Structures are given as structure tokens and as C-alpha cells.
Image: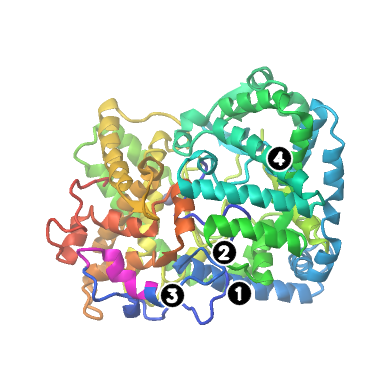
Amino acid sequence: MRLHRFALLGMMLGLSGAALAAGTTVDADSLHPGWLDTHASPAQSFYQFANGGWQKSHPIPAAYSTWGTFNILQVRNETIIRQLIQDAAKAHAPDGSAAQKVGDFYASGMDEQLIDRLGIGPLSPELDGIAGIRNLSDLQREVAQLQMIGVDAMFGIGEMQDFKDSSRVIGVAGQGGIGLPDRDYYLKQDPKFKQIRAEYVAHLTRTFQLLGDGRQLAAREAGIVMTIETGLAKASMSRVQQRDPRAIYHVMTLVQLDRATPNFSWSEYFREIGYPQITSINLAMPEFFGALGKDLRSVPLEQWKIYLRWRLIDAFAPYLSKPFVDENFRMQSAVTGAQKLLPRWQRVVNAEDDALGFAVGKLYVEKEFPPSSKAQVLEILHGIRAALKGDLATLPWMTPTTRKAALVKLDLMGERIGYPDKWRDYSTLRIDRGPYVLNVMRANEFEQKRELNKVGKPVDHDEWFMTPQEVNAYYDPSMNNINFPAGILQPPFFDPKAPAAVNYGAVGWVMGHEMTHGFDDQGAQFDGHGNLKNWWTPEDAKRFHAATSCISNQFSGYTVDGDLHVQGKLVTGEETADLGGMMLAWRAFHASSAYKSAKIVDGFTPDQQFFLGAAHVWANNIRPAEARRRVTIDPHAPALYRVNGTLANLPQFQEAFQVPAGSPMVSAHRCVIW
Ligand SMILES: [Zn+2]
């Protein structure tokens, strides 16, 4: 709930990041004539026209489930980061320094011989702990310990800014404890989801065999895990339900928490995780905890122990010996369609990015983000802010009361470019040359504690929730700020040498998108200080709701992998941001001094360059299994529809490419945000 990102990156099932495809670079010529499919008509599918050539010449590498501009930038970053890490590893930095940790983490991850020799050994203390469970209170204690080292066992614990008092940080517990990407994978009767369930049970069976259990026993254990996880999935809220902030906000005292969770003692739990001072949290999904509490007694203890063994292995398999890594990948492959494991160095760089992301990020920005970039980017950003201000001031349907509050919210919206002013302190995290999996485990624990340490303390307004190297951007409704890491401020998003039209269409769209999140169907429920508080008059709220419903209806009509429909209600916020953001970027471009001197390039008018710049952000190919996974879990629409669905609502686009009425690139019911 916390962040509204521009794109879904970090993957489930431990799959993250990208691999090096030979010879793939982002073209220097910023209009990318080679990306076009000039046989396609912009009026039929602008996406095909803008990216059809790219799609043809960029098949998905075997190790990937999707391949696009984001992946190519990630691979570029991974290559840079590997060099930085290797330099750190060679420097023999003083013990305990950030450079020592950065270097040693990588060295431990690359030490394949040691990793393979140790096998499951490093997890013995945890496996012994699980085997020693004799009663419900042992079970609860073990779950608490596993959660602290990063195991998704039963449910999740963390922190959040209090929705209703954004000056406070409170604890939050939410649904979790399942190995497939979403409840739909357990519950949908569609044959493709059934197929993945069958593969999952086979994967569970093989994993228990790797732990030394006989085939028959392993198959029985797999069935037990599947039953427990299906129960948790059934009790879970859908992603659409979770988009309502009021539906996931239930701050409770210890007495209320215990009442909501039968057979579980929250005061003991907080002591077990090391935070006895916590006496109230947001129990985000009370029904889930009600069902889990009942299961605690109705499911036999021996079965819970089998489940916990699985959750432990599922969390750490990617960092163990080859048989575990391969088995883990087999399941990822079934879910995403990727055919080959990434090279080890890339997997280690990605794990290190999770573990020590800001230590790596500090090295990254010193090398990759010149101060001159910041000034140019700010000029575009301020143009977009002015466009939004102009819209809010003049929207004909908005009443004066709502208008005033909206303008206050925009004035209070913070903006941050590049990287944090204050770097994260890793001094209490111990990293050494191995075993690798223990470095990962300690990094997980460090992060879990770092988060829980915030509970009850004032909000740290300097904190960033994305590393500088991440190719993404976000809006945070509780902070009411927009954030653009250095990673996204490079071509094809931002290119100091590109025509201004292209930069406005690409990075300008990203900026307008994040700013519009402050006013999408969720963002509009938070005020300028980040509090969940209604600042709309009833008639304005009704009109605004009609505008966002138009978007959810439009996107519900789109499908992937044959017949799977986009969940219009899941993507409402993101597609509102896409439409609003595109409109703002277009207006900012037209109001800029650069527009006055803009020229025709390669036969394209400045307006045409703007829309090509926008579409090129989403040049992408995707495997059917991955398309299915994303439609199930991702609040963003697929790339094709982010471009075509958004532009079909824009008369400015239709004018730029002379799209006739009645074409697929003209919405029958035009949606309007700004
Ligand atoms: Zn977004």
C-alpha cells in the first residue's frame, strides 16, 4: 500500500533483476527509427507502430520472462555494480567498513565450492528449532524467529506510517505465508492455474526429497503444505479489496488483537521478536488472522512443522547448494516461463542489491549521476507541477472548497531527485566471506529490525524507499512526496542529448504519473499532510469517481494470454496516473521554452516525437505465463495497454497522428482526469 511505483520490478519467488544479452544497448539516436514498425498504422495500434521493430529484433533471452527497456537498463546497472563490488572486494577495506561488506557479500555469493560443499548445513539450527516444537507456544515462538530472519511463515510483520496520523509510525501485521504468487493461483479453476498447482505439488515433493525424505513421505508432506497454504489463500483478501485503505486499517490493542486471533498471544509474540514495548498495531486483515488462529489448533502440530520446514527452504533455496537452486528455479520457470537460470554473478549482484542496496547505491551515484543531470530534470518536473496547478485551478467541475484543498495538497507535495541526502547506516550488520546464506539471513534480520525499530518513533522524512540505482519512481501517499531515483534518469527515459519532446514524453510522463498518484482513487483519500481524511465535497467526489470508473471499465475490456482479462479495478490507480500524467507532460511540453524552438526530426513533428518518446518507454516482449502472473498481481496494466489504452483517450494524440474517428486508437467513451 505504501508506494505507488511507475512499474512492477522485484519479482516474487526470489526471481529478480536481469541477465546480460549479448550486444543489447539502448540506441544512441533518441528517436529510435529502428524500433518502429512503419508497416503498422498508428491508428490501429500505436504500440505496434512505435515498438514493433524493436519487438522483432529483441527476442526474450532464455533467462528472462520479459524483456524490455527496463530490463536493458537493469542489466547495464548490474554490470556497473559488479565492477564497483569487485573493486571493493579487491581493496582490502578495513573490517566493518561499508566497502568490506560490499566486497565480502559478493565473494561469499561467488564461492560456489563452499556453497555446494555445505549444502543444507547452514540451516541446521533453524531445522532443529522446527523439529523441537512440542506445543502451540513453541510453534508461535518458532514462527516469530523465522519471520525475523526473512521467512514468510504464516503472516508478515512490519511498520507503516499511521494512515490517520502521518506523524506516527505504527506496527502492522498482514496476510502471507503462501508460496505461489497470489491467492488466485490456489483458488481459480482455470486450467492454466490448475496446471501450475500440479507443478507446485510436484515441486514441494521434490524439495522434501532433497531434505532426505522418501518419495512417499515427501508426497504426503507436499499434500499437507498445499492444504495449509490453500486455507491461508482462502482467508486472504484479494488485491482489489486491499486497494481500499480503510479496509486494511484496524489499529487494535493487545486485548483486541488476541480476541481477533484465537490461540495466539500477541504480547508473547512481541517479546519473542524483541519488541515487548509494542502494545498496539494495525491488524490489516482481521479475517485472515481469525482463520489462521483457528487453524493453529485444528491443524495438527506435526503438520505445522512440515509447513515451516518448507517455508524455511523456500526462503533460502536460491542461496543454497546447486540441487536447491535448480529445484527452486524449476518452479520459477513454471510460473514465469523463464527457461534458464541467470548467471551466478547476476543472481549475487541482485541479492546484494537487496541486502546492501544503499551501500552499493552510494558507490553508484558517485560514478553515474552528475549534478548537471539534476538541474535539467528539475526543469521538466517544475513544468509539470505548473501544468497540474493550472489544471486544478481551472477544472470546470471542481467546487471551490475541493479546489482549495487540492491546491494545498499539491503545494505540500515534496519532490526528490537522484538519491537520499542521508545514507543508510549498515554498521550493525555483520557480513563476512561465508557461508553465503548466512549473510543473506543476517541482512534480512537487519532489515526487519531496522523497520521495527521505527515503531513509536517520529517519522524519518529523509528516508527513501527505493535505492538510487533502481529503474523506477514512486509516490508515497503518507509522505505526500514524489521520488525519482538516479536509475530512471537515463535514456530512454531521460537523455540530455534528445529533443525536448522526447524527454517530456518519456521522463515527463513518469513525473506526471507520480504526481497524479496524489490524486488517483487512492491518493485522493489522503490529504496534503498524508492523513487518510476526506477533503472532497460529496458532489466532487461523485464526479471524480465517475472519471476513475471510466478507466477501470476501459481496462477491464483488455485481455492477455488468450482470455485472461485485465482486472480493471486493480489497475484503476495506475492507469489514472498514466492518463493524468501523459496529459500533464503534454501540457508542460507545450508551455516550455523548448517547444517554441522544437523542430521536425526524421520527418516527425514535435508532438509526434513526444508520443514516440512515451511509447518507447514500454518497448517490451513478455512470455504468456509471465503475462498471466502480472495480470493477477500487478496493479499496472500490461505495457501494450499502458500505451494504447492511455493514448486512445487523448485527442492531442489523435490530432498528432491524424487518427480518424472510429479507429481502435480512439476510445468510444473517452476518459478524462485532467
Ligand atoms: Zn504508479
**Element type at mark 4:** loop
Whole-angstrom CA distance, mark 2 to mark 3, is 24 Å
Whole-angstrom CA distance, mark 4 to mark 1, is 34 Å
Q: Residues within 10 Å of mark 3 (few under 14, many from 20)?
A: some
Whole-angstrom CA distance, mark 4 to mark 3, is 45 Å
- In the rendered structure, which amino acid carries the disc numbered 3? His
Q: Residues within 10 Å of mark 4 (few under 14, many from 20)?
A: some
Whole-angstrom CA distance, mark 3 to mark 1, is 19 Å
Q: Residue furthest left?
A: 661
- Mark linked to residue 469: 2
- Mark linked to residue 453: 4
Residue 263: where, in percent of width, then height? 72, 21
**Element type at mark 2:** loop
Callout in the foreground (1, 2): 1
Q: Nearer the viewer, residue 299 or 290?
A: 299
Residue marked by disc 1: 79
Residue 51 is inside the magenta segment: yes
- In the rendered structure, which amino acid carries the disc numbered 1? Thr
Which residue is at 78% across, 30% downward? 301
- In the rendered structure, which amino acid carries the disc numbered 4? Asn
Q: Which portion, as a residue range, is magenta?
A: 42-55
The numbered mark, 2 or 4, whose residue comes first in the sequence reads 4
- Mark linked to residue 58: 3
Q: 23 left or right of 574?
A: right
